[in-house]
Image (spheres, helix red, strand yellow):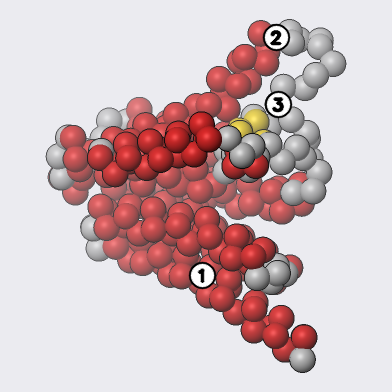
Amino acid sequence: MNSAVQNKNYVLPNLVTIMGLFCGFYSIIASLNGQYTLAASATLVAFVFDGIDGKIARLMNATSDFGIQLDSLSDLVSFGVAPGILVYKWALEPYGRLGWMAAFLFVACGALRLARFNVMTKKIDPRYFIGLPIPAAAGVVASSVLFVKEYIGNPEDITLPVWFTFTIYILAFLMVSNVKYYSGKTLFQQKSYNVLVMFVLAIFVIGLIPELSLFVLSVGYAFSGLLLFAYKRLRHPAGSSEEPFGTEV
């Protein structure tokens, strides 16, 4: 009986994961149809499902190896392939080989990032991610589309300058780098009233100016690892026993 109940418990978190996968697939279809704002929005909705599936599994005591593998495959589609196609169709296509190679590298490095995360989960400090998480890289792409729509013009009618191509290469590099990024996993374990207030203020700002705030947050997080690396380099110059990048695989 207990086994049957547990098997039922596995269904809900995996269904949530599948919903995230659906958002990624829908984003791909929207990108192919030239609906870039809709594709970016679908990617952001996938963030919600990706953020709650694991929490639901833990609350229901329904974590499993199957769920972990399904989550990684869903992430690769929703935050690797979908934003790769989105950014290619939206911004990189005019630049030929330079453009589609940037999109491919984004997807490939995202896959490598996910594989490394799966094998390193129990070996690293839970306060940090090693390398830019693939959802964060996808967030930069998706929020850029929404930012352009709100403050510059219709994304379907705008040709971005060639330097934007190199930002995709940079995102790909950051995903497979050993640069540390704050995970936030211990933030709400502090039981601090100030943390709650900051969270409420963040929701207020995002709700007030979502396109700008999401863009600033995603780009800021992508650069935060480099700032943390520079800070640790200043505190621990070359030759120091502390490794500012993290653990090699």
- Is mark 3 in CB contact (under 8 Å) with mark 1? no
Depth check: 191 or 63 in front?
Answer: 191
Q: What element carries label 1?
A: helix
Label 3 CA crowd tier, 10 Å (few <14, some 14–19, many 20+): some
Residue denoted by label 1 = 16
**Residue type at tag 2:** Arg
Q: What element carries label 2?
A: helix
Assign the C terminus to one quadrant of the image: top right
Residue denoted by label 2 = 235
From the viewer's perspective, is 105 left or right of 54?
left
At horizontal 74% and vertical 49% (from top left) the residue drawn is 121
Residue 6 seen in render: yes
Distance between mark 3 and mark 1 Cα atoms:
34 Å
Label 2 CA crowd tier, 10 Å (few <14, some 14–19, many 20+): few
Q: Which of marks 3 and 1 is nearer the N terminus?
A: 1
Residue denoted by label 3 = 245
Q: Where is residue 13 in the image (x, y as percent from the top left)?
A: 58, 71
**Residue type at tag 1:** Val
Which of label 3 and label 1 is nearer to you? 1
From the viewer's perspective, is 178 left or right of 135?
right
From the viewer's perspective, is 246 left or right of 190?
right
Q: Residue 241 carries which label?
A: none
Distance between mark 3 and mark 2 Cα atoms:
13 Å
Vertical placement of 107 versus 201: above or below?
below
Q: Position of residue 6 (x, y in %)?
A: 71, 81
